[in-house]
Image (cartoon, grey):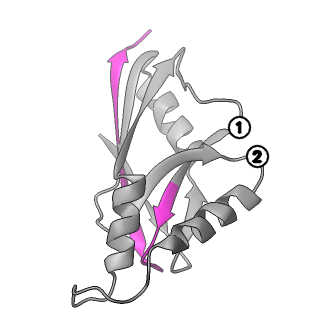
Amino acid sequence: MFSFSVSTAKKEELIDITPKIEKIISDSRVNNGICVIFIPHTTCGITINENADPSVINDIIKGLMIIPETGFKHAEGNSPAHIKTTLTGSSINLIIEEGKPLLGTWQGIYLAEYDGPRKRQVWVKTIGSQP
């Protein structure tokens, strides 16, 4: 298993971690297989979305404002972050083909922070055949 940390700077932000994942896949020497990416936090998730136009990321964060900030019972006051993490999820699976993740032309992999700023962990496991 590989892991790395990401320091977030805002309460809510999406951080492109695609280059780090590509490097981990390359270093793993898995030629064909699967890459599992897991975020071990309950107020931070992971998602795949467009990485060509930065306004899309801002629109996603704005769109998630449908979750109200108040009216929840959780004593820490970060229930909206827990709900947003449930929507984006805590893990993704990628197909590895010829040593690279298969992503669409405009896709990137994003750590989705909903309760920052914090230091977050990303766990990565590659499984498959090596050359």
Using a 10 Å C-alpha cutoff, classify the residue at mark 2 as few (fewer than 14 neighbours), some (14 to 19) or many (20 or more).
few
Residue, disc 2: 52
Label 2 to label 1, Cα distance in Å? 6 Å
Q: Is residue 125 magenta?
A: yes
**Mark 2 and 1 residues: CB-CB less than 8 Å, in contact?**
yes
Q: Which segment is the magenta one?
A: 111-131
Q: Quadrant of the N terminus?
A: top left
**Residue 122 marker:** none
Relative depth, front residue between 129 and 37: 37
**Which residue is at 41% across, 72% downward?**
119
Mark 1 secondary-structure assignment = loop
Task: Report which residue position mark 1 lands on.
Answer: 106
- The foreground one among 34 and 129 is 34
Q: Residue 88 appears at what percent x and percent y?
A: 42, 54
Report x, y in % for residue 66: 50, 72
Amino acid at dot 2: Ala
State which quadrant residue 106 falls in: top right
Earlier-in-chain disc, 2 versus 1: 2
Residue at the extreme top: 131
Q: Amino acid at mark 1?
A: Trp
Q: Is residue 32 visible?
A: yes
Q: Which residue is pictured at 40% across the width and 13% down the height? A: 130
Instruction: Say above or below: 11 vs 34.
Output: below
